[in-house]
Amino acid sequence: MPLALYALTAGSFGIGCAEFVIMGLLLQVASDLHVSIAAAGMLISVYAFGVFLGAPVLTVATRYMPRKAVLIALMVIYTVGNLLCALAPNYEILMVARVITSLTHGTFFGVGAVVATGLVAEDRKASAISVMFAGLTLATLLGMPAGAWLGLHFGWRATFWAMAAIGLVSMAVIAALVPRSREAHVPAPLAEELRGIARPQVALGLVMTMLGFAGVFVVVAYVQPLLVQIGGFSEAAVSPVLLLFGGGMIVGNLVGGKLADRWPTPALVGTLLALAAVLGAMSFVLHSPVAMPVFVGLLGIAAFATVSPLQLRVLRKAEGAGQNLASSFNIAFFNLGNAFGAWLGGMTIDHGPGLAALPWIAAVVTLSGLGVALVALRLDARAVSSPAVVAAAACR
């Protein structure tokens, strides 16, 4: 893999920290700002919803800019957003600062995925995506537990100061290592890009991404209260358990990329099915001090094994001119799923059966994403066997 790809990994690590560290700080933020756990959980939902809105808007707004310049500009916004989080005097200002930070997320991963796949040969594109997304998994392995540790010992604001510093370092690495394009960046007409993402199979891919991954955040958004209030773990034990989740994400991300390179369709179905199975089985181990950490690690593996197959499918179905926008839209739909999952988890806690019900509800949500995937694959099969396609193949 080219060195520039690892510069993208550094950037994704920084942005991933902003998304995930809040999950290990919910109890501290709720206590300090005098809000409920579910209200603190909305800081996760609003970030994810900001990604959903920001991804297509910023992708279109920066479409004439060189991709390297776009990536650097996004890291500037990221750094400013985290500084505002660290300085936020109340819940409302923290919410606004989270939205500002979130606006960079979708476009960075969308543009970064296109840059990453352009750096390697055709048979390594899924692996290139997984290497870039490895920064996101490292953010959970290192950033998420480190953020929880900082919050526990120095206050939750210290975590956001640390992320602002990470933003500056990531910006410098991208500036130094990502090459400038030798060709003038002339994007396809916007109408052509929009037609690319308006294809039915692209739309189905976006929906399966949202629903398939939403189940993860029904549980992960509230992993700290799940471990402390249901599992009986101490707050100090949360960071080591989150290390298992982050380690699992690294394994799942790499495995998902390899599987998607070799068997794209089985990887898509198999990873979504595995994720639903892990979430469902977690319902039975919530009170086990031994099995619960194991399942947190398995959840990390299963969750991020889905990322490369889902992202690659949307890129392939968009084709050509639509890939830039489709890539960012798919990241946006990952985060729409995150927002929906965190919201649904909060509703389950405040108005439903409570914390203990989160895993099985999450499994049902992910199974609905698998259902969409099966519908899309059936449409693929029909298209391949249609008379027009068969006649065209015979002529060749």
Image (spheres, rainbow, N blue to C red):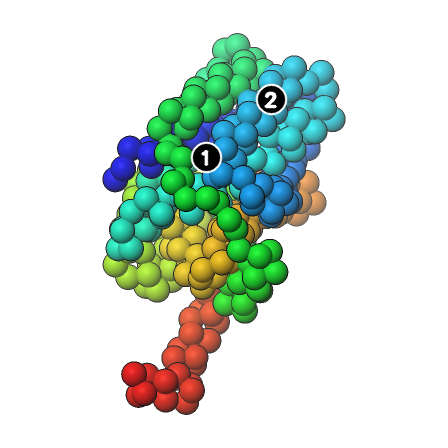
Of circles 1 and 2, which is in front? 1
Quarter of the rendering occupied by the N terminus:
top left
Does residue 222 appear in this view?
no
> Residue placed at 36% from the left, 85% from the top?
392
What residue is disc 2 on?
80
> Residue placed at 72% from the left, 20% from the top?
90
Percent coordinates x, y for residue 248 in the rendering: 34, 38
> Disc 1 to disc 2, how far (Cα)?
19 Å
Q: Which mark is residue 68?
A: 1
> Residue placed at 60% from the left, 56% from the top?
190
In this view of the protein, which residue sits in the foreground, 355 or 124?
124
Q: Secondary structure at mark 1?
A: helix
How many circles with numbers are drawn on the protein?
Answer: 2
User: Decide: marks 1, 2 in contact (CB < 8 A)?
Assistant: no
What amino acid is found at the position of numbered circle 1 in the picture?
Lys
What amino acid is found at the position of numbered circle 2 in the picture?
Val
In this view of the protein, which residue sits in the foreground, 352 or 105?
105
> Residue placed at 41% from the left, 44% from the top?
183
Percent coordinates x, y for residue 255 in the rendering: 28, 47
- Residue 377, relative to residue 102: is it above or below? below
Percent coordinates x, y for residue 195 in the rendering: 57, 64
In this view of the protein, which residue sits in the foreground, 353 or 61?
61
Furthest residue in direction top, as rendered: 154
Q: Secondary structure at mark 2?
A: helix
